[in-house]
Image: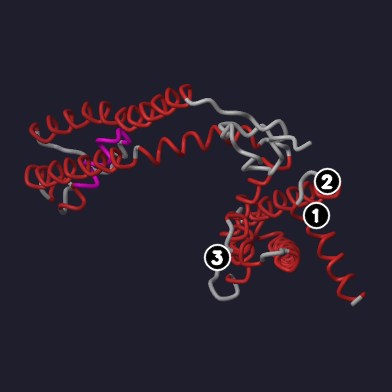
Amino acid sequence: MPQEQNNDTWKTKWFRIIFRHDTRNGKLFDEVLLVLILLSVAVVFLDSMPDLHKRYGGWLFAVEWLFTLVFTVEYIIRILVSPVKRKYIFSFYGIIDFVSVIPTYLSLILVGSQYLIIIRILRLLRVFRILKLVRFTSASLYLLHALKHSREKILVFFGSVLILVTIIGTFMYLIEGPENGFKSIPVSIYWAIVTITTVGYGDISPATPLGQLIASLLMLTGYAIIAVPTGIITSEMARRHTSKEKSPTIECPQCGEKDLNPGANFCRNCGNPLKSYD
């Protein structure tokens, strides 16, 4: 019984250090973790440079494995101290933590896959919680909400653009032909996409007067088309902002989370009580 109690105490202590960000040890742990993440990403950058890889490849390889082992141990400890292990493993941060350690082990089978360690930089998202910047993430949620509710319109728009570039690409294939670089309909569609998005690689260009006329019209159309998704999303954001003004909300005094229901008892972000119970 005492051994089980000590085990629970050990897990509780490390749970507070690893998962809680409002304690001194928790903040220190996360700050050290962020520094290690930045250093590990820097190692990947340096290893991708041919001169440095040739001179210090062995050292960089060793340091890379050292960071991977540290993050592997950290990931295992997170699982061990989690009250609901499945919840952490399949959470957003749990998946990111797992994916960040896989590339190095995968490199034992697939050469070059260790550069996928760059995914580890996603772990820096924890900085929002460490520096208490959660209130600023509401702006990103605001944008995600607008994207979600305008997805049907955006899909219709992209579908229309896809039909347009398919038709234009087919016409250009018939007008220009393989002798001018339009070797097939897919290649011609690729040219139409590059042209309508005003990227203009220049690897394929029309040579006939009719083809140049169509290209000019497609370029002008591209300028108008680029503004359409922006208008759709902006309209949805304005509509949501108007509806928010009509419905009163409250703000959490602890973390600054906004748009909380006035009838809520606890903050949905940090769990801070919104009402006093005397």
User: Tag 1's secondary structure?
Assistant: helix
The x, y position of residue 157, in whole percent, is 25, 38
Image quadrant where residue 212 sits: top left
- Residue type highlighted by circle 1: Arg
Please identify the residue farthest to the front as the structure is shown.
Answer: 278
Callout 2–callout 1 Cβ contact below 8 Å: yes
What is the three-letter code of the residue carrying label 3?
A: Ser
The main secondary structure of the magenta stretch is helix
Q: Residue at x 21, y 39 (%)?
A: 205
* First reached walking from the N terminus: tag 2 or tag 1: 1
Question: Which residue occupies the foreground of this view, 99 or 181?
Answer: 99
Q: Position of residue 43 (x, y in %)?
A: 68, 54
| Element marked by disc 3 | helix
Identify the residue at image location x=56%, y=59%: 116
* Label 2 packing within 10 angstroms: few (<14), some (14-19), many (20+): few
The part of the image, by quadrant, that contains residue 256 is top right
Task: Kindly indicate whether the residue at mark 2 contacts the one at mark 3 (C-beta within 8 angstroms).
Answer: no
Q: Earlier in the sequence, mark 3 or mark 1?
A: 1
Helix, strand or loop under label 2: loop
- The percent position of residue 232, horizontal first and vertical second, equals 33, 30
Report the magenta residues as a range.
Answer: 189-199
Seen in the image, is 67 located left or right of residue 24?
left
Q: Is residue 131 left or right of residue 137?
A: right
67 is higher (above) or lower (below) than 25: below
Q: Is residue 50 visible?
A: no
Residue at which label 3 appears: 113
Q: Which class describes the residues within 10 Å of circle 1: few (<14), some (14-19), or many (20+)?
A: some
Name the residue carrying label 1. 16
- What residue would you read off at disc 2? 23
